Image (cartoon, rainbow, N blue to C red):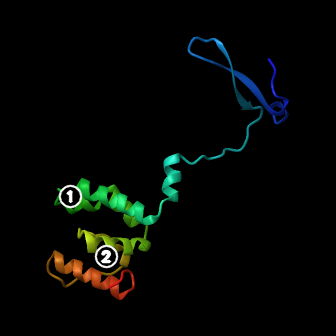
Amino acid sequence: MAFDSAASQFGYYPEPVMDFCEKPTTHFRFYPARPRKIEYIIHPDEETALARPLEYWFNEHADKWAMETGVHSSPVIRFMHEDYQAIIAKGPQIIPLILKRMRNKPDDWFWALRYLADEDAALNVQGFDAAVAAWLKWGADRGYISK
């Protein structure tokens, strides 16, 4: 068997690869002769997630949260859902996206907004629509969204 001397020059040696019939093939895997530093490879799904804009990520998780918890009235089930928690974990940078979504598709984002904003814009408000309006006004007053 003839090997390219370049591979052996860098400390790699060939190991024959066996197929299911245990017949040697002409393909070789090269293994390092000595241990090397571990290199982490990003999974393709993680790589595309890193390249996607935050708004796309947010909408994907918000849609999944709405679909999976829309039939539940329990706040524990809705607010402790993994996608809702992942959205909150992004921090205050996600507030404009929540407010924009509330404007188009009102939903119960009040717990997340109270946590992220560290205040309650709908404290003395009665009803869902009034709370949405209060948060949208709060966001417009602070420059998170346009009026």
Label 2: few (<14), some or many (≥20) within 10 Å?
Answer: some
Q: Which of marks 1 and 2 is in front?
A: 1
> In this orientation, does residue 110 appear?
no
> In this orientation, does residue 86 appear?
yes
The quarter of the displayed image where residue 10 is located: top right
Q: What residue type is labelled 1?
A: Gly
Residue 85 % position (x, y)? 35, 61
Q: What residue type is labelled 2?
A: Arg
Query: Which residue was labeled with disc 1?
Result: 70
Q: Horizontal placement of 86 versus 46: left or right?
A: left
Under circle 2, the secondary element is helix
Residue 114 % position (x, y)? 31, 76
Counting residues from the start of the chain, the first of labels 1 and 2 encountered is 1
Q: Which residue is drawn at 18% across and 81% down?
A: 130
Residue 13 % position (x, y)? 77, 27
If the image is split into quadrants, where does the C terminus sit? bottom left
Residue 1 to residue 11: above or below: above
Q: Horizontal placement of 67 versus 27: left or right?
A: left
Label 1: few (<14), some or many (≥20) within 10 Å?
Answer: few
Residue 95 to residue 33: above or below: below
Q: Which residue is drawn at 30% across and 55% down?
A: 64
Residue 89 % position (x, y)? 41, 65
Judge by depth and name the residue closer to the eye, 45 or 119. Answer: 45
Query: Which residue was labeled with disc 2?
Result: 114
Residue 9, numbered label: none
Farthest left residue in view:
127
Q: Which residue is drawn at 35% across and 58% down?
A: 61
Q: Horizontal placement of 128 versus 10: left or right?
A: left
The quarter of the displayed image where residue 63 is located: bottom left
